[in-house]
Image (tube, rainbow, N blue to C red):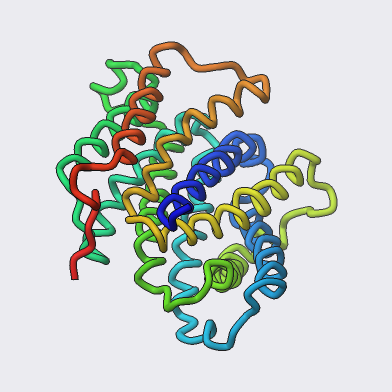
Amino acid sequence: MTPEARGHLAMLTFSALVAGSFSLGSLVANEIAPAALNAARFAIAAAVIGAVAAATTGLPRSAARAPWRYFVLGGLFATYFVLMFEGLKTAPPVSAAAVFTLTPVMSAFAGWVLLRQITTPYMAVALVVGAVGALWVIFRADWQAFRAFEIGEGEIIYFWGCAAHAIYTPMVRKLNRGEPAVVFTFGMLVAGCLILTVYGWSDIRATDWANLSSIVWIGLVYVAIFASAATFVLLQYATLRLPSAKVMAYTYLTPSWVILWEIALGNGAPTGLVLVGVTLTCLALAMLLKREDRPAALRQTR
């Protein structure tokens, strides 16, 4: 299997795992302060990834060079997760997942600014198709709502979190200095945990950790292990092998995965018209992953 193929497989797994954080996140978002939840999430994920790194690649001293890099990345991802859970207090899971699918467009722009990655016309069309599908779901297939541009407060809050996520993707490639994905992820998680601990210290102290409901602990363990530790490594791994826009193209699968999660949790399925938007996002993914006539769909100029 080629490095590019392994990168695609990593992102397919990433999209399946991250989708669960929307459905479970909506269940716990109003039970615990987002800063407190995510500080614990980063701490648990850092412990897991640190143990994996120690048992595999080790933690070379060279990885400690320029530690500010980890704080930049940790700050971006901490911003994303805090705003995600703030948004999920009011935004439905499928709608929030649709906002997430706007990330590839923002990531393509960030990739050009930071890395001078060039998006071809073909990929631009695919990104537009995905964005239309995302907007279709966000507005719940309601043309009147679209004309009035009625977006929920939760979706707006989460959009800014997705902007931070979009910047994070090309920033990984820009700041990585040859460290293995698991080591680089560990540094980012430790830095993110420190940032969240300082930022959310009052919320952390105010949280009655001993009496949290079982669903909060289930959600915390899931987002820490599966939607954090695992997905961070997968994202770092894929980002070093695929262009930023193609990495984030897999977010187009998120609404479909979330719909399956919602059905599994007994929350029902969306209306048929909303599924049209989901279909468009899946079409966009297929377009982005299809090889063009040219060897590379997205080139990095030097």
Residue 229 drawn above or below residue 99:
below
Whole-percent x, y for residue 130 in the image? 31, 33
Q: What residue appears at the point 28 percent right and 58 percent down from the top-left corner?
A: 110
Corner quadrant of residue 128 = top left
Q: Is residue 153 toward the left or the right of residue 119 in the image?
A: right
Kindly give the residue lying farthest to the front in the view shown: 1
What residue lies at 52% left-to-right and 52% top-to-bottom?
81
Report x, y in % for residue 214: 80, 40
276 w.r.t. 84: above or below: above
Between residues 216 and 253, which one lies in front from this camera angle?
253
Residue at horizontal 45 percent and vertical 34 percent from the top: 253
Q: Residue furthest left?
A: 121
Q: How many marks?
A: 0
Percent coordinates x, y for residue 154 in the rendering: 46, 38
On screen, residue 263 above or below 299: above
Q: Give the percent coordinates (x, y) of residue 232.
A: 54, 58
**Hey, which quadrant is residue 167 in on the image?**
bottom left
Residue located farthest toward the top when viewing the structure as drawn: 272
